[in-house]
C-alpha cells in the first residue's frame, strides 16, 4: 500500500484519471493496482497493489502520471 500527499486542488476526478493511467501501465511491471482511497479533506491518496517489489509499484506511478508515493508499505491481508 502506498500513500500520496497531494495539494488541496486535487479532485476525485484527478485521482480517477491517475488510477486509470496506472491500470494502463501496470502490466509492463507485473503490478496489479487493486483499489484506491482518497481522503480529500487531508489531501491523501492510498493505493493498494500487488507487486513484485515496492520499486515496481513506484515505477508504474512514475511512468503513468508522475505522482510518486511519499510512503510505501508492504502489508498482508487479515480478517
Image (tube, rainbow, N blue to C red):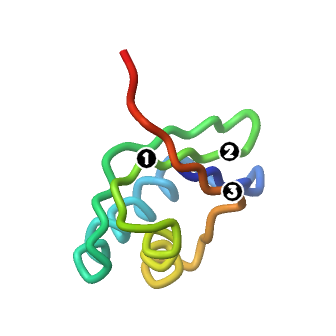
Relative to 61, say whether 45 is above or below: above
- Single out the mark in the foreground, 1 or 2: 1
Q: Give the distance between the C-alpha atoms of the residues marked 1 and 2, in whole angstroms.
A: 13 Å
Which residue is disc 1 drawn over? 48
Which residue is disc 3 drawn over? 71
Q: Which class describes the residues within 10 Å of circle 3: few (<14), some (14-19), or many (20+)?
A: few
Which residue is disc 2 drawn over? 44
Which residue extends farthest top? Answer: 79
Q: Which mark is residue 36?
A: none
Q: Residue at x 63, y 50 (%)?
A: 3
Quarter of the image containing the C terminus? top left
Q: Which class describes the residues within 10 Å of circle 2: few (<14), some (14-19), or many (20+)?
A: some
Q: Residue at x 51, y 66 (%)?
A: 54
Q: Residue at x 43, y 74 (%)?
A: 56
Q: Residue at x 39, y 22 (%)?
A: 78
In which quarter of the view is residue 67 placed? bottom right
Whether residue 68 sits left or right of residue 55 in the image: it is right
Amino acid at each position: 500500500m502506498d500513500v500520496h500527499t497531494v495539494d488541496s486542488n486535487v479532485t476525485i476526478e484527478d485521482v480517477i484519471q491517475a488510477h486509470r493511467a496506472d491500470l494502463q501501465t501496470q502490466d509492463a511491471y507485473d503490478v496489479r493496482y487493486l483499489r484506491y482511497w482518497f481522503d480529500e479533506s487531508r489531501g491523501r491518496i492510498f493505493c493498494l497493489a500487488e507487486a513484485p517489489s515496492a520499486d515496481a509499484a513506484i515505477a508504474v506511478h512514475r511512468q503513468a502520471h508522475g505522482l510518486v508515493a511519499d510512503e510505501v508499505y508492504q502489508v498482508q491481508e487479515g480478517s
